[in-house]
Amino acid sequence: NPTPIAATRERTVDGFVREFLRELNFGQGVDLSRASVNDQYLAMARTVRHYLMVRWLETLRRQGELQAKSVAYLSAEFLLGRQLDNALLASGLEEIVEEGLSSLGIDLATLREAEVEPGLGNGGLGRLAACFIDSLATMNVPCIGYGIRYEYGIFQQTFVDGWQVEKPDDWLALGSPWEFPHPEAAVRVSFGGTVEQYQADDGVIRRRWTPGWSVLAVPYNYMVPGFENGRVNTLRLWSAEATHAFDLGIFNSGDYAEAVRAQTFAENITKVLYPEDSTPQGKELRLQQQYFFVAASLKNFIDEVLPDGYDLHNLPDRINFQLNDTHPVIAIPELMRILVDEKGWDWDDAWSVTSKCFAYTCHTLLPEALEVWPVDLLGRLLPRHLEIIYRINDAFLAELRETYPDDELRVRRMSIIAEYPVRAVRMAYLATVAGTKVNGVAELHSQLLRDKVLNDFSEYYPDKFTNVTNGVTPRRFVRLANPGLSGLITEAIGDGWITDLDRLQGLEPLADDSEFRRRFREIKTANKHRIADVLVHRDGIVVNPDTMFDVMVKRLHEYKRQTLKLLHIVSLYEQVKSGKLDIAQVTPRTFAFGAKAAPGYLLAKQIIGLINAVGRTINDDPALEGRLTVAFPANYNVTLAETLIPAADLSEQISLAGKEASGTGNMKFTLNGALTIGTDDGANVEIRRLVGDDHFFLFGLTEPEVSDLVDRGYHPSAYYETNADLRHALDLIASGAFSRGDRTVFEPIVSNLLHEDRFLALADFQAYVDAQARVDTFYADTDQWTRSAVLNVARAGFFSSDRSMRDYIERIWHTPPVLP
Ligand code: 26Y
C-alpha cells in the first residue's frame, strides 16, 4: 500500500506555515498581503483538514478490509457547530497553528470568528447526533452518520422592537471548507407513480413500482475526527439535484423554462430545514426530505459500503441502522422494498432481515409530537411503501389477535394505521414493531414510554424497551468551551478526563481545598467577563460580571416554561416597585435567555416579545439600581452556547415534570460548574441523584402529582386568586406596564395562563419562587456555593456522550470498538 501523500505533511510550525501559505496562494488565489479574513479562514480550514486526511483515508481503508459491525446513525438533523476548533483539537495541532499564524501576524481567534456554524438542526436532537458521532469516532467505533445537507439551516433569529423576525441562514455563502462533494457518487431517489402486479421470470406474482419522478442525491462527506486517536469517521449529508433524465423529457418538448423550473423543483427537497421541533406539520416536502435521505443512505450503504457480492442475509451482523426519532423510519419499508422488489426475496426472508437491522430512539413525550403520515399523502408520494406498511401491519395485527383473541380494542389501539381523525401511519408504532430495540433518552422518559406512551407495546414486547440516558461530548462542551476550567482540571488530575469523564471524580476532595475553590471561582469570573465582552460586541447588551448569572437557554416551548422564569422576574420587579421588597436586599442577578421559537408557533413568539419587553423595562428602571438585568441575545446557537454556558452560575431546567424527555443543556451546565434549579424531569432526575440533593435546587410537582392534578381537573385561576404575588405579577403584565400601556399586546399570554396553562406554570409558581429564595441564601455564602459547584463537576462524568455510546453498544448495537 503506497503511503498517501498527506502523510508527508510536517507537523512543525514551519511545516504548517508552508502548507497554510500554499493553500492561501493556490487554493484561494491570493497572497498574504491581500488576503481577507475569509480567505485566511478558508485556507486555514483546508490546511487543517489536509492534516486529518491521511487518517481519514486510513480509517476508510481499514474499514473496507475489516468489514466490522458498525453503526449507521440516520438523522434528519446534525447540529454540528463550528468545525475549526474541534479539528485542531482532534488533530493535536492547536499549538503549532497558533504559533504559526502568529508568526505571520494572524490572530487565530479572528479566524475562528470567521466560521459560520452549520446549523443543520433545531436543537437537542440534532446536537445529540453531533455529540454521538464525536464520541464514536473518539472510541474507535466504526460509524457513518447519514443526514441532509440543507442549503439553509435553522433560521437566523433577529429582534425587531423585541419581536422575533426570521432571516434565512445562508451558511454556505462564503464557502464551506469542511465538506467533500462527490457528484460522481450520486444516487437516484424516486417518488410518486404507480404500482402494478406482474408475473416475474420465475413465475412468481410480484409488485412493480413505476415511479413518477426522481431526483439525484449527491453525497457531501464530512470528517468526524476522534480525539487524538488517529481515527476519522464519516458523516455523509445528501443534497438534492435534478436528474438528467428528469430534464430530458421536458427539454425535448422544447420548454426550456419549464426544464429549469423542474430543476429548482428537485432542489427544493434539501433547500431548507423545517424549523419546527415538536409539532409536525404533515407537509409533503418534509416527507420528501425524509425518504430522500433515507433511500440514498440505504442504497449507498448496500451498494458502496458493503463489498461487492455481499450476501444481504448477513446484513444484521454488519450494520445497525439507528433511527433518530421517527424522521428516518420510512427506511424500514424501503429496506423491505429493496429486498422484496429489487432482490426478489420472499416476504418472510426480507422481514427476518429487516426486523434485525433497525433500532429506534424516541425523543418526546408530547402526544402531538409523534409523527403520523396521512395515507393519502404517503400513498401519493410513495405508493409501494404504503402497500408494504399495510402488509407489515396485517401480519402484525394477525399476530396480536393470536395473543389477544378477546381484546379487539387493544388490537386496534396498537394498529400501525390510525383511523381517526384521518387514516394515517403512526411512524413510532412502525418503528417499534420493526425495531430490535426502542429506547428513551433518560430514565424517567424511558419509564414513561413503557408505562404510558407505548404501554401496549411494552407489554407485548417487554424486552424491546430500554433506556439510554443522553450525554454530551466533553471535547466540545468542556475542553474547548471552557479552557480555563479544563486547565485547572488537568492540573489537578491529568488530562485523562477528556476521554474518560468519570475521572472527574478525582476532583471531589478538592471541593474542600480553599485554594482550588478560589481558582475555580476566578475561572468562572473570567468566563463571565468573556461572555460580557461577546454580548457587548455581538448584541450591544451590557451585563455586569459581578452578578449571579442565571441562565435559561433552549428552544422556546410552553412545556419548558420560560414564562415561569419570567413570572419570577416580574414578581421581583413588582415587589420592588410596590415597596414590598428593598432593592438592597435583592441578590444582583443577570437573567440570561436564549431561545428560538418555531415561526408558526404564535404563542412562543409572543413570549419572546414579552421577555424582551420586560427586559427593556427592567434594564432601564433606575429603581433597580442595576441589580437586576435581563439579557436576551438573539440567535442562540451552538457557538453562543459555548461561551454562555461556562459563565453560568445557575442553570434553569424548569420544564413541567413528565414533559422534557431528557434535556442535554442541563448536562452541559453541570459539567461547567453551574448549580441547577430544576424540576424532577428528564435527566434532571439523574443529575440530582448523582450530584446530591444538597447541591441541586429541586422544586415543583412530580410527574405522578401532575397526572393526578390534571385528572382531578386543573384550574389555574385558583392559584391566581389565592397567591397575591402571582396575581400582582400577572396583573402587572396585563396592565400594559411592559407594552407602553397597551393592554392588548400580551393579553393572549395572560389569558392563556389564567384559563388554560397546559403546563401548570401557575401551579408551580410558589414552589419556584421559594426555590429561588434558597438559591439566594446559598449564593450569599460564596465558599459554600463554589464547593457545590466543584462537586457538580466532579460528579457529572456520567453525562459524557462516551458513556451514552457505551450503553448503546452494550444494550442495542453490540459493536465492539476496533483497533484505531
Ligand atoms: C417532526 C418534526 C416536527 C420534529 C423535528 C425536530 C420533531 C422533533 C424535533 C426535535 C426534537 C428534539 O430536539 N427533542 C429533544 O431531544 C433531546 C435529545 O434527546 C432531548 O434532550 C430533549 O428533551 C428533547 O426535547
Image: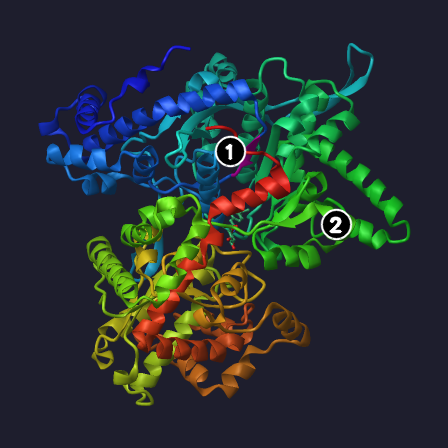
**Is the residue marked 2 within 8 Å of ligand 1, measured from its CB?**
no
Q: Give the alpha-carbon distance from disc 1 to disc 2, as whole Å.
A: 28 Å
Q: Which residue is located at x 32 percent, y 46 percent? A: 480
For marks 1 and 2, the one nearer the N-term is 1
Determine crowd level at label 2: few under 14, some 14-19, many 20+ residues with C-alpha closer than 10 A: few
Image quarter of the N terminus: top left
Q: Nearer the viewer, residue 438 or 625?
A: 438
Q: Nearer the viewer, residue 309 or 159?
A: 309
455 sits left or right of 554 in the view: right
**SS at mark 1?**
loop
**Is the residue marked 1 within 8 Å of ligand 1, measured from its CB?**
no
Q: Is residue 697 magenta?
A: no
- Residue carrying label 2: 462
Q: Main secondary structure of the magenta part?
A: strand
- Residue 524 seen by the camera: yes
Q: Which residue is located at x 52 percent, y 50 percent? A: 470
- Residue carrying label 1: 141
**What's the residue type where badge 2 is placed?**
Pro
693 sits left or right of 451 in the view: left
